[in-house]
Image: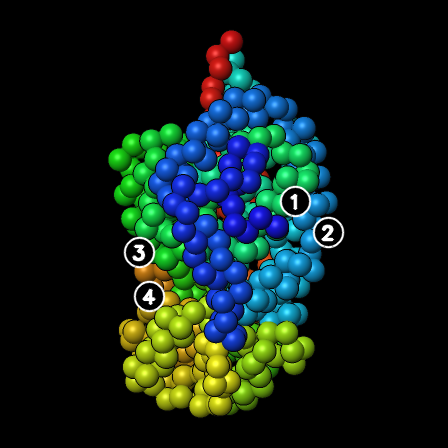
Amino acid sequence: MNRDSLYIGGRWVSSTSGHTMAVENPATEEIIAHVPAGTGEDVHRAVSAARAAFDGWARTPMAERGALLGKLHEALSARAADIAKTVGLELGTPLKVAKNVQAGLPLAVLRGYADLAADPVPEESIGHSLIVHEPVGVVGAITPWNYPLHQVVAKVAAALAAGCTVVLKPSELTPLVAYLLFDAADEAGLPDGVLNLVTGTGTEVGAAIAGHPDVDMVSFTGSTATGRAVSHAAADRIARVALELGGKSANIILSDADLTKAVKVGVGNAFLNSGQTCTAWTRMLVHRDLYDSAVELAAATAQGYRTGDPFDEGTRLGPLVSAGQRDRVRGFIERAGARMVAGAADVPDKGYFVAGTVFADVDPASELAQEEVFGPVLAIMAFDDDEDAVRIANNSRYGLAGGVWGEPERALAVARRLRTGAVDLNGAAFNPVAPFGGYKQSGVGRELGSYGLAEFQQTKAIQR
């Protein structure tokens, strides 16, 4: 694996900076690798390579692109164990979650796009017009650290299936797993320049991608603040932007819900990946008749989440990604101003750990209920009726995900009223081919499945 290089134009090359960035293991605070600190000049080289490759890739029949994505899936699947181990080292995700989610989910998404491209939807006609879907062009993909391969694949696979070429900047905190993808891409025989890798900081490489005049679309996942900056940079040249940003999702437990299941699954959702999940149900809204029992059960459930070494099979909460993230989460806990019912547990002395924390009697207007904590912190609130639950849930500038528990038709009625991009009823499983994205400040556009593919396409009407 060429971790000392960038991947541009189908070749491993050196960065023009000659400098590197350290990658840290957040569970041990040890430096585990170095990767190139890319520059704006490196971005320009990568964009030029992507532009040169675009016409040929765009003209390649979609079914042939799908076949190449199938080869990429095969090569990446052979690296599944390495993916889980790498994410465990650079992010601290516990091994079981790393295998099932950090490795399993991106492989499922990649397989889905390979299949979608291999069997393209026939072109439609409207009257005397032929409706044609064409690739947007060169895509700049800027991805986060919390699901470092899934977020890459969700963008890259869709863009490649659509006929776009890509310049990728992975997070500087978790760049190593991207190298496994590029090793697999090299093995699969993707044409030169179709997929390019430039590692580096957001301020240097990310900004250069967002502002590059020859990048036709920027697809970004990360914080709302950074998404706003990316959008502004792209707006100067009227480039397309897709943004998947923050969340403060509500988990609504109605009066006729299966309380035990709703609370236990809800705590697990809020604590998944140490709470470093944009869709996490970090607000638990419980009908007042069930409230005291829910608080007691949530506290007991949280106390069962053992914190420690990600490679220990008994660990359920790994570290946060960095010292800065740990300190940020601790700040929210210290300022909470609510009743802590779980969380005062010992954590390892070394590493960036925070115990699973639950607060009850949280004010719906408070910082804890309004701001994205991005750590294993759950806020519980009571509501009086369905109308009250919907009002509290929608009282957020975010709208990414959520859950509703109760009698199916009643739960569906509540779900329809939530201003959010996805809702799970009674613990329904995540669907990797359903559209994913947010309302309000949670983003613009959709990822996954046919909706994700459409984000990377232009629509043309040909009259005949």
| Distance between the alpha carbons at the discs numbered 4 and 1 | 44 Å
| Distance between the alpha carbons at the discs numbered 1 and 3 | 33 Å
User: Residue 237 location in percent, x, y?
Assistant: 29, 32
Q: Could you tell me if residue 324 is visible in this image?
A: yes
Q: Residue at x 66, y 59 (%)?
A: 82
The front one of 303 and 125 is: 303
Sequence-wise first label, 1 or 3: 1
Sequence-wise first label, 2 or 3: 2
Q: Which residue is mark 3?
A: 225
Assign a secondary structure to mark 3: helix
Q: Which residue is mark 4?
A: 395
272 with respect to 211 (left or right): right
Q: Are marks 2 and 3 in contact (CB under 8 Å)?
A: no
Write down the quadrant of residue 245 in the picture.
bottom left
Q: Which residue is mark 2?
A: 78
| Distance between the alpha carbons at the discs numbered 4 and 3 | 19 Å
